[in-house]
Amino acid sequence: MRPVAPWDQPQDPCFTRGEDRAGDAPVSAVSDARSFWDHLGATRAEEYAAEDILPDLPTPLPQPSRDPGPEAGFFPLGDMPDSASASLNDVLQAHEVGLSEAPLGDVCEGMASPMALHAGDGLELTEVRLPPVVHPAPFGRELPRRRARKRQAGTSRLGYRLQRIWLTPLYRNTIRFGTPVLAVALGLALYFNDESRRASVAEAIETTRSAYFERPEFMVTDLQMPEVSPELDAALQDKLDISLPESSFRLDLDALRQSLEELDWVRSADLQLLADGVLSVSVTQRIPAILWRSGAGLELLDAEGVRVAYATHRGARPDLPLIAGEGAGAHVAEAMELFDAAAPLGERLRGLVRMGERRWDVVLDRDQRIRLPESGAVAALERVIALDQAQDLLARDLITADLRNPARPVLQISAGAMETLRAIRSQSRE
């Protein structure tokens, strides 16, 4: 007697599906040999059923490969059409007719009972259970349409979009923090929409602020000014314009410093709050270094060419050297070097004149002029001073010493000196 294999164990055909002895490949309805195409069709049908492509078909009942007899509930092979000439459609239709005629109880009962197999070879066979065969639809029959899937909860298009929006950090932070802020802002706007409420709140804030600012330790009661001229002191007082006592919180020291530095006499200013409510003011004055006669009048300039003040006449500052001409105020440093080089001339020096905004002329008494070049003006002036010290050049009847071309200096004398020179030359010829 042949032992029963694990895949030949009896199972309930109403709830389970049999397995082939050699694997998952089913056995054909008309042959006991395993067919590759039956296995492929069954596999495809199971995949389509898992993917919900084809409708759920009732699980077919197992089909024996040999005639089990009428007691098993299956039609005999003799009642089937001729397998040699019948088509697959005829075979399947005959199989469906046999299944429809057998009651469900008998089918299940027959499947559970042993199947009688032909044993012409003298072997005693035990119960054989074959896997079910998934039959395709008969040719010409239209398959039912695909059933619509039931939409799962939370998978709607609107729900999906809302979920994606909520997962975005920008929208999530906006909803979390923007909504409360918007609610608070809306509430404040509704509250301050009334003018009386706004006025009361502003008054309360100002009262609290004044009570804090006007405490005695924050009050400025005295002003300490530097030692300057009376004119500059009055200008400083006018620029500060502080009414004491005043709270230190209401004093803008930077603005006061800038206003003081706008004065021509002030180079820099500094303001400090000292103990006992004292405001100390210190300034650095500009020292006039030169007097410039311009189209606007007489101006006092410092060594950097910055205007210090205006002068009414030349006698107001006789100690300062004088320059004149357009653009002379922009070349104060060069003018100061020329004044230092012309120091040996002493009181004969009257001043410098800027010519064509390009070069300088040195003006002496007796209307004498020394015309200096554009470059090397200090060296040219030193040569003239050396000639004067050696030969008394400037003491003669000289009008102009032209040194604009250093390689060819030109001297211009007066008309009387020319007549005297001619007379001396004529006498020498005779």
Image (cartoon, rainbow, N blue to C red):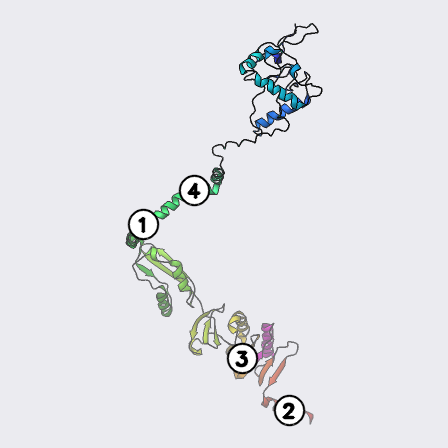
Residue for point 39% across, 46% down: 182
Q: Name the residue tied to disc 3.
A: 363
Q: Name the residue tied to disc 4.
A: 175
Residue at the outermost bottom position: 430
**Crowdedness near tag 3: few (<14), some (14–19) or many (≥20) residues, C-alpha within 10 Å:** some
Which comes before the other along the chain, label 3 or label 1?
Answer: 1
Q: Is residue 347 visible?
A: yes
The residues colored magenta run 368-391
User: For the residues marked 4 and 1, what is the alpha-carbon distance in whole angstroms?
Assistant: 24 Å
Camera-side residue of 157 and 181? 157
Identify the element where label 1 is drawn: helix
Q: Which mark is residue 422?
A: 2
210 left or right of 21 in image: left
Q: Is residue 39 visible?
A: no
Camera-side residue of 257 and 290? 257
Q: Main secondary structure of the magenta part?
A: helix
* Residue type beneath disc 2: Arg
Q: Name the residue tied to disc 1.
A: 191
Camera-side residue of 41 and 232? 41
308 left or right of 46 in image: left
- Is 176 located above or below residue 90 in the figure? below
User: For the residues marked 2 and 4, what is the alpha-carbon distance in whole angstroms?
Assistant: 110 Å
Looking at the rendering, in which quadrant would you find the C terminus?
Answer: bottom right
Identify the element where label 2 is drawn: helix
Looking at the rendering, in which quadrant would you find the N terminus?
Answer: top right
* Residue type beneath disc 3: Val
- Which of discs 4 and 3 lies nearer the camera? The answer is 4
Q: Which mark is residue 210?
A: none
**Crowdedness near tag 2: few (<14), some (14–19) or many (≥20) residues, C-alpha within 10 Å:** few
Q: Is residue 376 magenta?
A: yes
* Residue type beneath disc 4: Ile
User: For the residues marked 3 and 1, what is the alpha-carbon distance in whole angstroms?
Assistant: 81 Å
